[in-house]
Image (cartoon, grey):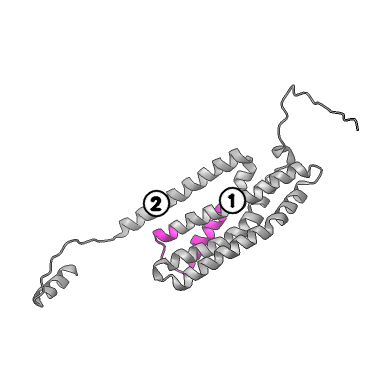
């Protein structure tokens, strides 16, 4: 096709020079799938290790369950509607993983604090109280982010249309998954206050002080 266009232009009397010819075949698509999938898997593995050391392995598995849930829904949405999946969409999926993880870490931090404060409460009550305390902050953050993405979707043009679509869907899905899937998964796995209470050092002496008024 390029040679035919070149001959037609030469017949018109214009000086034309062929500088470069590129062809995108199925090999590029296969490399995108392999390297993109590897990037997502390595990201999830790194998150698993990070949450495991910062919190507890049950929280790590709950966070990974929520992130896999988010990724599968976004990819399934593009597959169902037969939308173009390119590098920008892959970048959006990785951004969704980071966004969802941020909300999950915030909720986990509050759960850990409440396990120390509410020692006599059942694990279900502690998680319920923690989620309710963080619900307003999470919803407000997601709404403001979604407003920006809606503007990008409407006026951003075709170049970032799929990117903004993936991010918008990921923000919506990631908001409820960090609340209702990550915490619930950790609870189903049997996390309790004993797993998050600070460990007392052996031989530590307890001191009491008395004050005279």
Q: Quadrant of residue 28?
A: bottom left
At horizontal 59% and vertical 43% (from top left) the residue drawn is 51
Tell me if mark 2 has few (under 14), some (14-19) or many (20+) residues whose alpha carbon lies within 10 angstroms of its own: few
Expressed as whole percent of the image width and height from the top left, the position of residue 9 reads 13, 74
Tag 1, which secondary structure? helix
Question: Can you see residue 190?
Answer: no
Of 37 and 161, the residue lying toward us: 161
Task: Give me the C-alpha separation between circle 1 and circle 2.
Answer: 22 Å
Question: Can you see residue 17?
Answer: yes
Q: Disc number at residue 76?
A: none
At horizontal 75% and vertical 49% (from top left) the residue drawn is 126
Count all numbered tags in the image, as a single digit.
2
- Compared across the picture, whether 175 is left or right of 168 comes to right
Furthest residue to the right?
Answer: 213
In the rendered view, tell whether residue 62 sits above or below residue 175: above
Expressed as whole percent of the image width and height from the top left, the position of residue 65 reads 59, 51
In the rendered view, tell whether residue 177 sits above or below residue 114: below
Of 143 and 63, the residue lying toward us: 143
At horizontal 68% and vertical 58% (from top left) the residue drawn is 135
Residue 157 part of the magenta-drawn span: no
**Image quadrant in which the N terminus is located:** bottom left
Expressed as whole percent of the image width and height from the top left, the position of residue 192 reads 73, 42
Secondary structure mainly formed by the magenta segment: helix
Q: Quadrant of residue 11?
A: bottom left
Q: Disc number at residue 65?
A: 1
Of the two numbered discs 1 and 2 on the same chain, state the one appearing first in sequence. 2
In the rendered view, tell whether residue 196 sits above or below residue 21: above
Q: Quadrant of residue 145?
A: bottom right
**Image quadrant in which the C terminus is located:** top right
Q: Which residues are magenta?
A: 65-90
Furthest residue to the top?
Answer: 203
Residue labelled with disc 2? 34
């Amino acid at each position: 096709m390029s040679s035919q266009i070149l001959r037609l232009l030469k017949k018109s009397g214009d000086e034309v020079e062929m500088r470069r010819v590129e062809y995108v075949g199925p090999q590029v698509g296969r490399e995108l799938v392999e390297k993109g999938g590897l990037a997502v898997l390595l990201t999830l593995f790194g998150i698993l290790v990070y949450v495991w050391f910062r919190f507890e392995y049950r929280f790590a598995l709950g966070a990974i369950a929520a992130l896999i849930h988010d990724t599968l829904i976004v990819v399934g949405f593009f597959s169902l509607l037969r939308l173009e999946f390119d590098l920008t969409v892959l970048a959006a999926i990785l951004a969704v993983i980071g966004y969802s993880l941020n909300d999950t870490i915030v909720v986990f931090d509050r759960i850990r604090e409440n396990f120390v404060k509410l020692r006599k409460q059942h694990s279900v009550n502690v998680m319920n109280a923690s989620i309710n305390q963080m619900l307003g902050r999470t919803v407000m953050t997601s709404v403001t982010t979604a407003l920006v993405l809606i503007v990008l979707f409407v006026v951003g043009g075709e170049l970032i249309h799929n990117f903004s679509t993936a991010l918008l869907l990921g923000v919506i899905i990631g908001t409820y998954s960090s609340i209702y899937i990550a915490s619930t998964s950790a609870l189903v796995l049997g996390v309790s206050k004993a797993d998050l209470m600070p460990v007392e050092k052996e031989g530590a002496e307890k001191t009491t002080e008395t004050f005279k008024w």
